[in-house]
């Protein structure tokens, strides 16, 4: 038996500080790596990686196939219905055992579990979004120790919690049948979409989804360091609010030194650290004469940071040393009376400058979070930035994202609208539920509030709207009970905590919401979709999406969108030949939105001839293509409507200052509203987004035969611009005629109408043109004749009715030079929606899904992995609209 060394007394410990450095007073031992995993009757015993989950472990050990393959989400339902135990044996050294305090820390436990060490139960967990730690010095042995984490089935646990809540129903009971999901997810604090959603499968995960470790210390442990810059407008001075969450072994006096060398800042504080776990706040006042470099959203400036150095001394001995990045920026959410409107404004001001939010909504990147690797996370966020996005909304039915997500957003200047993890449901308000939520909120706000990218907290996704518009058919007599629960959870607890912990950014109770107006109405507005207040979610799959008059002229559009199917190369690995039909069991199974597959075709049929090839595979791939064309056109039309509405107020509606379409990414290979497929491949919509989110954009639309072209500018300086309109014939690559407006002033941050003409007159002036035979392209030019922004186009009729369209017989040649790969295209005719696809070769094109009105075009290809001219040439497929007819 190993000899156990008695721990030093507190008095002796001080005498030994001469040989104890800051790093030595805290020892850390990772328990990540290979564990053992077993199910309830031990019929399955296997190795399992931590961090990880049961599904990943079963797949890695070949007990199951890829869970995403075909119908495996149904075949593997048994996994979430069983109880599972993770166990590991680890050695502990004398150096750890003799420390004054030893904590066993779980950064993420998914979800309901009992933790035991050497046969002694340490405690229980019930919240995926919390860190748990247990004091284990007395339970540890020098030598081998056995740690077990015994999980209950999340599905059965949620069901039992629902049964125990017998006084009244907390809806919804179950998801719609089309989602093929599990019930009562609102009774368990885990990723709400893990029980299924209308874009994702039901994989209720179980496991240690984040790291596990021991931390042993003699004096203190710094659990969390946060640094919150706050700006005092009255005296034009920055101050930095530095907060420590510290676990202290014994009460002692300490000297804290905080410095930001680049700002010439160094301050010392005397404080007393009291035994136990407490928060300590220190304020650094920045010299008013010091110019501070500000963090700006993408497209508005740079994203500089400063280094905060923290050191703690006990007399002359260094016991604490930590460094952290600090970013300076202010954010305000303006909700003020608007001239000409009975409502309120709703827009963000960053560093005093109004900013139009352009972007999308983020969902979990994988059903199994341990499989979200840094490379894929970076790729998705870089793809958002490359499409000229400056904002993402982290949706409230997923997870609070990992630190790397927010670090990358900080670096890229991507603003984050951060939901708390509640979505599309009512929630219980029993004391134990509220308490675990309060700890969840405290930990997440403490972890995330130092990130400048996060510009707002929002209490939930769509729960105000669900209650206000009675999604769940709650009898009127019972509504007060649910209103009380809503206020208890989101106002009395979450809002109260957030506002106390973070004075640097606004908080909204829900999304969508009428914001300040909802608050006036008791936190649940009569109509949370009122476009004159707050933010709006809008979906309509029946109306013609090319008709801009059907869109709400809202202050802020935080959700809107249309579905499409991913590429064949994305579907192929999880399907077999019999699945490759639009009417197959597979395509029906993969669609989790009621009537979604038919809605896509119905919307596409309004403007396009639907694929009708006699070759079953071609008809299927053509159908995938036409849904992407439809989706890209629909979201383009709606986004351009929001962007041109930023400076207008019509019948009290307008001054739109945000467009976040639903959704950026996919959780698996299936039809959804995403613009990026599972695996990172850009859909046609994402290529369109790069244009319709451009900093300077021409937007064209018709109103009663009059063509209007707006110049939209997100720049911070004024411009003088003119619109140049070119008329083309569908049947000829030579343009028919060109018209230009006069130069007009376009103030920075505005949308201005700079071209207005009757379409009838325009065509008559060009000759040999009608709505059916011609189309328009247009762009903006400055005083020097330089084009600003992309070239846009306007169809004068539905492409299905266009006369003169011919098969373009495009040829393509792939080449490589020092700058990378290029594809040179040659076309014999005008070609709408030219789509380049290189199958499974990772990368993206400089342009795609475009209108080709020239004989030649050269497109760049950015490869994300090593490839060659030969592989790209072999993989390249070019599709145009006429190729599917």
Image: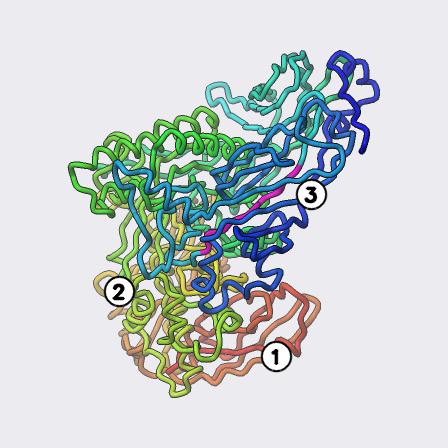
In the image, what residue occupies the spot 42% across and 73% down?
625
Residues marked 2 and 3 touching at CB (< 8 Å): no
Q: Is residue 302 visible?
A: no
Q: Which residue is mark 2?
A: 544
Q: Which residue is mark 3?
A: 89
The boundaries of the magenta stretch are: 203-213
Give the SS element for disc 2.
Answer: loop
Q: Position of residue 19 (x, y in %)?
A: 83, 21
On the rendered structure, is 866 left or right of 727?
A: right
Q: Which residue is mark 1?
A: 873
**What is the chief secondary structure element of the magenta stretch?**
loop
State the residue in front, 607 or 311.
311
State the residue in front, 447 or 783.
447
Which residue is situated farthest in the left direction here? 477
State the residue in front, 129 or 633.
129
Q: Residues within 10 Å of mark 3 (few under 14, many from 20)?
A: some
| Image quarter of residue 8 | top right
Please state which of the two labelled residues, at mark 3 or mark 1, is closer to the viewer: 3
In the image, what residue occupies the spot 27% across and 51% down?
552
The label number, if any, that marks residue 588 in the structure image: none
- Whichever of callouts 2 and 1 sits on the residue coming sooner in the sequence is 2
Q: Position of residue 357 (x, y in %)?
A: 43, 46
Which residue is situated farthest in the right direction here? 19
Residue 212 located within the stretch drawn in magenta: yes
The Cα–Cα distance between marks 2 and 3, rounded to whole angstroms, is: 62 Å
Q: Position of residue 690 (x, y in %)?
A: 48, 59
Q: Residues within 10 Å of mark 2 (few under 14, many from 20)?
A: some
Residue 134 located within the stretch drawn in magenta: no
Please state which of the two labelled residues, at mark 2 or mark 3, is closer to the viewer: 3
């Amino acid at each position: 038996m190993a000899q156990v060394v008695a721990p030093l007394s507190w008095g002796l410990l001080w005498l030994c500080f001469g040989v104890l450095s800051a790093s030595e007073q805290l020892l850390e031992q990772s328990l990540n790596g290979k564990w053992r995993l077993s199910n309830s009757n031990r019929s399955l015993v296997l190795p399992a990686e931590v961090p990880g989950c049961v599904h990943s472990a079963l797949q890695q050990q070949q007990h199951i196939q890829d869970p995403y393959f075909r119908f495996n989400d149904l075949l593997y339902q048994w996994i979430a219905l069983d109880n599972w135990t993770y166990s590991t044996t680890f050695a502990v050294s004398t150096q750890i055992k003799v420390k004054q305090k030893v904590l066993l820390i779980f950064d993420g436990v998914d979800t309901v579990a009992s933790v035991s060490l050497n046969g002694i139960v340490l405690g229980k967990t019930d919240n995926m979004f919390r860190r748990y730690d247990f004091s284990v010095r007395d339970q540890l042995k020098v030598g081998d120790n056995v740690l077990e984490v015994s999980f209950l089935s999340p599905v059965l646990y949620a069901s039992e919690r629902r049964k125990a809540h017998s006084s009244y129903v907390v809806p919804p009971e179950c998801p719609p049948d089309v989602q093929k999901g599990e019930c009562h997810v609102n009774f368990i604090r885990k990723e709400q979409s893990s029980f299924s959603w209308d874009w994702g499968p039901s994989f209720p995960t179980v496991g240690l989804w984040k790291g596990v470790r021991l931390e042993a210390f003699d004096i203190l442990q710094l659990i969390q360091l946060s640094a919150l810059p706050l700006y005092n407008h009255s005296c034009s001075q920055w101050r930095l609010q530095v907060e420590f969450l510290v676990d202290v072994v014994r009460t002692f006096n300490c000297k804290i030194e905080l410095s930001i060398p680049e700002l010439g800042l160094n301050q010392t504080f005397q404080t007393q650290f009291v035994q136990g776990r407490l928060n300590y706040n220190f304020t650094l006042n920045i010299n008013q004469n010091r110019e501070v470099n500000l963090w700006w959203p993408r497209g508005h400036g740079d994203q500089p940071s400063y280094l905060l150095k923290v050191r703690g001394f006990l007399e002359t001995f260094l016991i604490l040393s930590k460094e952290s990045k600090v970013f300076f920026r202010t954010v305000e959410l303006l909700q003020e009376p608007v001239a000409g409107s009975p409502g309120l404004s709703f827009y963000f001001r960053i560093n005093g400058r109004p900013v139009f939010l352009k972007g999308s909504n983020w969902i979990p990147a994988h059903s199994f979070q341990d499989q979200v690797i840094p490379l894929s996370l970076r790729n998705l966020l870089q793809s958002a930035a490359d499409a000229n996005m400056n904002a993402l909304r982290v949706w409230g039915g997923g997870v609070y994202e990992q630190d790397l997500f927010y670090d990358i957003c900080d670096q890229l200047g991507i603003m984050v609208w951060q939901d708390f993890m509640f979505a599309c449901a009512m929630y219980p308000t029993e004391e134990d539920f509220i308490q675990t939520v309060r700890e969840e909120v405290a930990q997440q706000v403490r972890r995330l509030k130092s990130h400048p990218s996060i510009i707002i907290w929002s209490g939930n996704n769509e729960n105000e709207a669900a209650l206000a518009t009675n999604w769940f058919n709650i009898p009127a007599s019972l509504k007060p009970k649910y209103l009380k629960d809503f206020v208890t959870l989101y106002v009395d607890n979450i809002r109260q905590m957030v506002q106390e912990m973070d004075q640097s950014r606004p908080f909204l109770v829900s999304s969508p919401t009428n914001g300040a107006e909802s608050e006036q109405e008791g936190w649940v507005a009569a109509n949370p979709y009122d476009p004159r207040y707050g933010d709006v979610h809008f979906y309509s799959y029946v109306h013609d999406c090319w008709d801009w008059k059907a869109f709400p002229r809202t202050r802020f559009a935080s959700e809107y969108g249309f579905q499409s199917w991913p590429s064949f190369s994305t579907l192929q690995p999880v399907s077999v030949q019999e699945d490759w039909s639009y009417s197959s069991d597979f395509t029906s199974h993969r669609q989790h939105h009621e009537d979604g597959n038919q809605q896509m075709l119905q919307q596409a049929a309004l403007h396009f001839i639907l694929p009708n090839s006699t070759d079953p595979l071609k008809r299927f791939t053509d159908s995938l293509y036409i849904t992407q064309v439809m989706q890209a056109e629909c979201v383009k039309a709606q986004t351009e409507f929001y962007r041109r509405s930023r400076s207008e107020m019509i019948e009290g509606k307008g001054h739109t200052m945000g467009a976040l379409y639903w959704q950026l990414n996919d959780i698996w290979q299936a039809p959804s509203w995403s613009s990026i497929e599972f695996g990172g491949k850009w859909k046609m919509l994402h290529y369109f987004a790069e244009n319709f989110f451009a900093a300077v954009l021409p937007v064209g639309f018709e109103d009663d035969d009059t063509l209007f072209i707006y110049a939209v500018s997100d720049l911070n300086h004024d411009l003088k611009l003119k619109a140049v309109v070119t008329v083309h014939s569908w049947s000829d690559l030579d343009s028919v005629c060109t018209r230009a407006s006069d130069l007009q002033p376009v103030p920075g941050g505005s949308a201005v109408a700079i071209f207005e003409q009757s379409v009838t007159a325009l065509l008559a002036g060009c000759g040999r043109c009608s709505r059916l035979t011609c189309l328009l392209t247009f762009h903006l030019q400055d005083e020097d004749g330089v084009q600003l922004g992309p070239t846009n186009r306007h169809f004068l009729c539905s492409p299905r009715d266009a006369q003169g369209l011919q098969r373009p017989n495009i040829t393509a040649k792939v080449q490589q030079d020092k700058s990378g790969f290029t594809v040179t295209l040659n076309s014999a005719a005008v070609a709408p929606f030219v789509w380049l696809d290189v199958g499974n070769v990772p990368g993206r094109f400089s342009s795609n899904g475009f209108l080709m009105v020239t004989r030649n075009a050269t497109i760049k290809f950015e490869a994300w992995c090593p490839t060659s001219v030969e592989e790209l040439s072999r993989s390249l497929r070019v599709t145009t609209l006429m190729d599917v007819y």
